[in-house]
Amino acid sequence: MYDEPLLFESGSPGRRAVSLPGDDLPPDVALPAIEPELAQPALEGLPELSELEVVRHFTRLSQWNFSIASNFYPLGSCTMKYNPIVNEWAARLAGHQSVHPMWPDQLAQGALALMFELEQMLAEVSGMDAVTLTPAAGAQGEFVGIKMVRAYHEHGGNPRKTVLIPASAHGTNPASSVLCGYRCVEVPVGRDGLMHVADVEARLDGDVAAVMVTNPNTLGLFERDIRRIADAVHARGALVYIDGANMNALCGVTRPGDVGADVLHINLHKTFSTPHGGGGPGAGPVCVKKTLAPFLPVPRVVRTSNGFQLSEDAPLSIGRVRTFHGNFGMLVRAYTYMLGLGGDGIARMTERAVLNANYLRKKLEPLLTIAQREPCLHECVFTDQGLADTGVKTMDVAKRLLDFGFHAPTIYFPLVVSGAMMIEPTETESRETLDAFVAAIERIVAEARKDPELLKTAPHTTRVRRLDETRAARRPVLRWRPAAAPAEAAASGAETSTSSAET
Amino acid sequence: MYDEPLLFESGSPGRRAVSLPGDDLPPDVALPAIEPELAQPALEGLPELSELEVVRHFTRLSQWNFSIASNFYPLGSCTMKYNPIVNEWAARLAGHQSVHPMWPDQLAQGALALMFELEQMLAEVSGMDAVTLTPAAGAQGEFVGIKMVRAYHEHGGNPRKTVLIPASAHGTNPASSVLCGYRCVEVPVGRDGLMHVADVEARLDGDVAAVMVTNPNTLGLFERDIRRIADAVHARGALVYIDGANMNALCGVTRPGDVGADVLHINLHKTFSTPHGGGGPGAGPVCVKKTLAPFLPVPRVVRTSNGFQLSEDAPLSIGRVRTFHGNFGMLVRAYTYMLGLGGDGIARMTERAVLNANYLRKKLEPLLTIAQREPCLHECVFTDQGLADTGVKTMDVAKRLLDFGFHAPTIYFPLVVSGAMMIEPTETESRETLDAFVAAIERIVAEARKDPELLKTAPHTTRVRRLDETRAARRPVLRWRPAAAPAEAAASGAETSTSSAET
Amino acid sequence: MDYTPHTEADIQAMLAEIGVARVADLFAHLPEDVRLGRGLDIAPGLSEPDLRARLAALASRNRAELLSFVGAGAYAHFVPSAVDALASRSEFATAYTPYQPEVSQGTLQAIFEFQTITSILLGTELANASMYDGASAAAEAVLMALRLKAARGRDDRGGKVVVARSLHPNVRQTIATYLSSMDGVRLVEAGYDPGGRVQLDDAAAGNGDSAGEVACVVVGYPNFFGVVEDLRAVSAWAQAHGALLVTVTLEPLALGWLTPPGALGADIAVGEGQGLGLAPSFGGPGVGLFGTRESFLRAMPGRVVGETVDADGKRGFCLTLSTREQHIRREKATSNICTNHSLCALAFTVCVSLLGPNGLRDLARLNVRKLRYAAAQLAGAGLGERFSGPTFNECVLRGADVPARWERLVRRGIVAGLPLGRWYPELEDAVLVCVTDQHRRADIDRLATEWRSAGTA
Amino acid sequence: MDYTPHTEADIQAMLAEIGVARVADLFAHLPEDVRLGRGLDIAPGLSEPDLRARLAALASRNRAELLSFVGAGAYAHFVPSAVDALASRSEFATAYTPYQPEVSQGTLQAIFEFQTITSILLGTELANASMYDGASAAAEAVLMALRLKAARGRDDRGGKVVVARSLHPNVRQTIATYLSSMDGVRLVEAGYDPGGRVQLDDAAAGNGDSAGEVACVVVGYPNFFGVVEDLRAVSAWAQAHGALLVTVTLEPLALGWLTPPGALGADIAVGEGQGLGLAPSFGGPGVGLFGTRESFLRAMPGRVVGETVDADGKRGFCLTLSTREQHIRREKATSNICTNHSLCALAFTVCVSLLGPNGLRDLARLNVRKLRYAAAQLAGAGLGERFSGPTFNECVLRGADVPARWERLVRRGIVAGLPLGRWYPELEDAVLVCVTDQHRRADIDRLATEWRSAGTA
Ligand SMILES: Cc1ncc(COP(=O)(O)O)c(C=O)c1O
Ligand SMILES: Cc1ncc(COP(=O)(O)O)c(C=O)c1O
């Protein structure tokens, strides 16, 4: 393996990849009068490369990633399922890419129809009444959802003060609540990994605005008390927020809206297969019951006798949360996926996700320590407890898995499990792949006993070895900077650009 | 690095990636009466995979290739220049992909116009009068060209018997000549690597149909005697065939047609940047002088007052050589390339290809043994002579280069140079890349002296190590076959599909 | 479509391994009363050919072929073919957030490069790994300014936020939404002058107001009217009031012509990257740019990638400083953002790499000149510039009967800009026209001709 | 466009290193009288946006949107989106022929898989790494048959080649071109029977002819009329005459319905792979399929990839048996082919992998049924089947006034098949109609309606 320098360490002054269209204007078109101090762009340091250099750079970089397209990626809570190629095709249709968000509605009827139908499908899957597709990701969905909770209570005269959140919740839940001006109160998780109605009730007072429940929760367990919790919450005038990031485990089986949810967000980049992009863009639609519909953010897609329209006529709306209406490109992908799967296919997706998780769990149980004996849904959580005597930790198992061509599970999350390994295979993986993964774990467990050092120094076959993350945080280097003297910079650039072989 | 089983070793019976459109026909549509013995397709053994399995399989395989997109690829005679992405875009336009070769001409005017204009540009670059775009590759271009030579002589009453070919020629030259019923007579190459008029004249008799000259030749040298050779050949009523696979060295500088060529082929997959595809498809247009135009293969693209037409009205034509008119998809790419570069750009391409080759040559001369002192054009040939005392051979240098992320040069060709390393950088590589390549050679030469074993066992960092090519030829295994007993096959398949880590 | 690989035999074998008889048994522990008990009311699935036909039909109902002069926060520029070819490589597109750096160096190095390019263009000491979009980045910048102000201990989280009326209305609305639950924070709008630039005076600071001191002032750069704010003056005003300057650049290409906001005093410079490398795509996804000072690092929202070394001392990259983030700090995080817009950041990075400094400058100048030409032609059609300030590729034009003429043009297949009356009643007679490198001279001439004839129709 | 990376400084530094003053000096050794001495008469280059505009305009002059029922050797079938997405990956597309196997295992393993799939579908013991297309593969098959006959020592390279008149005319012409310089070889055409199948009798063998024995007989499978030849009978005839049987399958999808030619006695089975994974693209590139018996291996043209092991004993693949090939054997090679159609072979391999045996079978059956439905509808429009033999997705229909009605349909935007008079004067009243999975029932109904109304018009 050879190195690839930074963009800024390559190239040559004056080199350029792109040629621009000839200026077809009369030469006497004057540039506008502008204060000279305002028109001094600082472009120095930007890469100066040929097209081939850019292509080669990013082609090489791409190969240094694990990805669903190249590797089993059982990252718990992230639902790393196959991202269909036909969805990419759909998102790139000229009719989808070129449509401008500020055009008059009648010029974008296809896009609005797509959004309207997608909202309807999500409402059906979740059992809710109305949907906004605007939020950019799950966290923004939470912000929008809790904001609506607040607007609802404010409309009722009192915004209330707190949101109840279980200890096993994703970090975005408390962060989003705080962003809406709430204080978070933690609800403990039972020995069985579940939230119990008594624990909720004990914290329910007139100040509670909502309880946020992730269902199935981050241990992959269905919150069986959900209906009773919802009843208790509703009885105190509070609302039930469901974090639906794990909807992949529920579709066609149960609907949050039928079981007490007032508001819920769905991650299209998990359940509905839009590619995660190495960290987004995603889309986090929020679904609500009728009572909350007036508070949905603007704009809303509405159907009128004149076709579909974007409406901002919503006096109780929490307002606007983005420049435009949402990550339309991701909505196209999710729509294509749902249309392709159909109602039956969506239910089959869930069944097989759960089948795969249970199969993996069953086969891994003799090898690792399961965090919870409860039956799991789409994912299962193991710990490194059984390896304690070897000194091998979850981190080491995770790193060693990379050597076998498998991405690691989500590790050290949820926080309520010490040394957690959260494994979510998804429905698109084959039995053979699951078996190969089990075989790798089996070998790793054996290695832990025989040669723990091998694991503690893993990975061994990846492009870089274990990284010094402490150093990254202690002495943050967050961008490239030209070396002090230009002469030196050129020299060191040339050095780095020389490929070097590891033998 | 982990293994990827063969398609046939993966999957599971009954698994399928693709769902087909519903049959929208009335159920009573009967299948035709066919003899049952004729309708028993043998599909057993075909892969049964999910879409994700197929995607992952080919994504992984792709990463095991070196390619222009990821590596410097100085494979001599192959002109591995950058293949522009915009050309790929152009070839995939629906208007290009969907047009059927048997449609009436008036429905394909865009395609015909493109072909017509491409022929004109190639004629201008080569200095010839007429062009056929039909041949699928250089070798088929040679076949067509020599076939026309024969048709020309036959038309004159005597097909003649031999074709003169220099010893440095590419293997396709003699093979193509034989295919046209000619015997090949080798012309020796001078000490200076060039073909000399005296050597040609010595072999010129009334039986010679043509002389095939590669110019610049496979040593990267311009055949300076070309005009005198052509005159001598013409004086004996024979024709001059130019193998234009190396046209990248000549465009805008000199034109074969101005210097005596009667017929020449051009490899669009070299000079005009269509991607080589791991072994094609290419395109090998043949350009001819007026005298040979009547013999061009059919169909011809002609311009009429009614637009462009495909004409088969050519009584002297050598006939048809393919199912349809040519590798249109490749023609679109070459056309896009030439249109993008323009006349100046095409000349600049040649100048810089020659500049790069001379620069590399100059910097490598102190390290390796140059095969010829003559000034080179687009490529240069070195030998392993200087390493004789180390026992290191051209093959070892080539294999070791792979460890540095560089593709090897063309080796052991041309045959007239022992231990040849034929290096063609092309114009799209940067000085920094050439310098890095030189640095690698420098290190390899040092290694040869210090640790020759390191080279003889190279490569060390590639997916597989040096392959046993002798075994492949002695005991040919040219396809996968199911293992004897089905039970065994399944077991061994599973084994191979288990990823295994190398530590 | 069915993307699951399970054959009937697979399912049976797996169920046997698990020890249950049917797939339904895997859900047996769900209480009876939470089960749906019926199929989803969603049409049956489609095969790929049928699916493609459906999507193509839907897409064709968007009038992508029209001649459009709308910018207003989403810009159609030349995007080299290589951008999508590279950014869409499946190893980039189908990876998760790079939690395992050893097998994510591709994404990580690309983000590090994005952070560098973004800080160069914004003129800031550093930049994060991306935000959702321009408006949410602006809102997060305001929250950050409020946090910084609180940290300086001047008053708790309260304070005033001065927002220019010349800032994109959607950005103003987004900021308002994000601030609406914050106690003691007041949004104040500052008007614009005849140049189309923000008018900052004592009134703007809401002096004497009980909400306390000004935390920050937020302006567009260029602003919604296409006008280049004089950041020197804005910055001086902000300093004088002890406030931070937040700039919002929704047209990133303008940074090929303009002095970077960071160099003119912006404390937090945010923006939208869509214009460089991404299609308008009905408004998303784009990518939020976020740059600021090194000294503000720990208050910054969002992910960052940092350089480090591996066990062999070899350079590598990893996510870092996550103690600011929700997954570590939970309710104390600087933001709730988790998934950001990484792949769009990659497209932006590829695009800028292809353009380089010269391409960026030339493309920017081409835009400036196209607008100048258009303004001259449209003057001939009775449309005059409403503001005197310098503009990039958008300007506000007014004239007689503008809304009605604009409607007529739409019917003729031209979206001749964005009528402004909806957001600015005082600009009822005005339209915001955007002219870019994508418009040929003939397109502009046609626009002028049609405006003229629409007036007489 | 300018894809060269050279800055002025680069050029100067490089020239200095070389030791010349100007780039022109690098050509100084070229004789004066060979220099062009002027610029090329080719228009100046275009920028990418202008280039894209030009190509899009040109492409739009092809009437890709028409309803077409033309097959005749190029077939538009459903191609899963994944095919191009994978086959176009730049590591595949921009690699050369895999001369360095250690860094070409991707291409090599894929070709090995292609060879396997091809031999399964053709029912042959082995297959090569690809040929240019169906016709040139057929011509090479005939040359190989002649070589094998010569090797059997029965008579030198001469002999007769019997070609069915029901074989695609372009394939017949190509064979003729390839054979025309061969001494002592005579092409004999065998007619067709009322079933549309080849009629092989003693006359076909050209008995008593001086050209000697029959080297091979070549038939289409299905043939040009869409009819499935009875290969059992053809094979028996070939064996009786000591000839080899060469089959040519231009519609690869038919192999999802038909018994593989190799299983019915074909000694060399060739074909065109375009229909599985590639667009018609005005006739190319497709991919030539070439399969034969193991015992004929050393006479086979073209490249092959073989399995082997590396220095560690690990499985790997490499080009092998190249002693048959031009770069080793030069004039004694089995063929002059060098570059073949590797990337198209990859697309074919990906497509078949996605379809799998069941998909292939179902897609093939869908084609058979669509044609049957169309034939029934067209019978109602006065078009009757000319031949009685079983057909796959094409058949010959005849009726009153066919050429004129066909012309009228073209003007109405329907290419209603291929009129056959040009190649078969006796079929002047007939048209070859191809119906595939791409035609919806409504398309077929429209075709029938239009044929009917074109008759009365
Ligand atoms: C349970 C849960 N909630 C919320 C989120 C946040 O979603 P996003 O990253 O899209 O903002 C995630 C994603 O990691 C999650 O797993
Ligand atoms: C000099 C020369 N002639 C002919 C050929 C044959 O061209 P092709 O491989 O396209 O058939 C080549 C390609 O390798 C070549 O380099």
Image (cartoon, coloured by chain):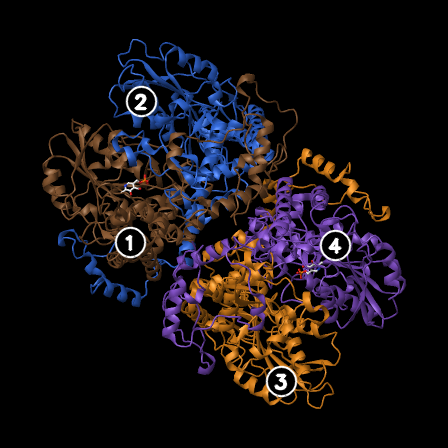
Chain colours: A purple, B brown, C orange, D blue
**Tags 2 and 1 on a common chain:** yes
Amino acid beneath label 1: Ile
> Residue at label 4?
A219
- Label 1 is found on which chain of the structure? D
* Residue displayed at 61% across by 82% down: C244
**Tags 2 and 3 on a common chain:** no
Residue D42 place in picture, x, y as percent: 28, 54
Numbered disc in front, either 1 or 3:
3
Is residue A251 rendered to the left or right of residue D347?
A: right
Amino acid beneath label 3: Ala
Measure the C-alpha gap from mark 3 to mark 4.
46 Å
**Tags 3 and 4 on a common chain:** no
How many numbered marks are there?
4
> Badge 1, how many Cα within 10 Å: few under 14, some, many 20+?
some
The front one of C393 and A458 is A458
- Marks 3 and 4 in Cβ contact (< 8 Å): no
- Label 3 is found on which chain of the structure? C
> Residue at label 2?
D147
The answer to whether mark 1 is within 8 Å of ligand 2 is no
Mark 3 residue element: loop
Is residue C55 rendered to the left or right of residue D264?
A: right
Amino acid beneath label 2: Arg
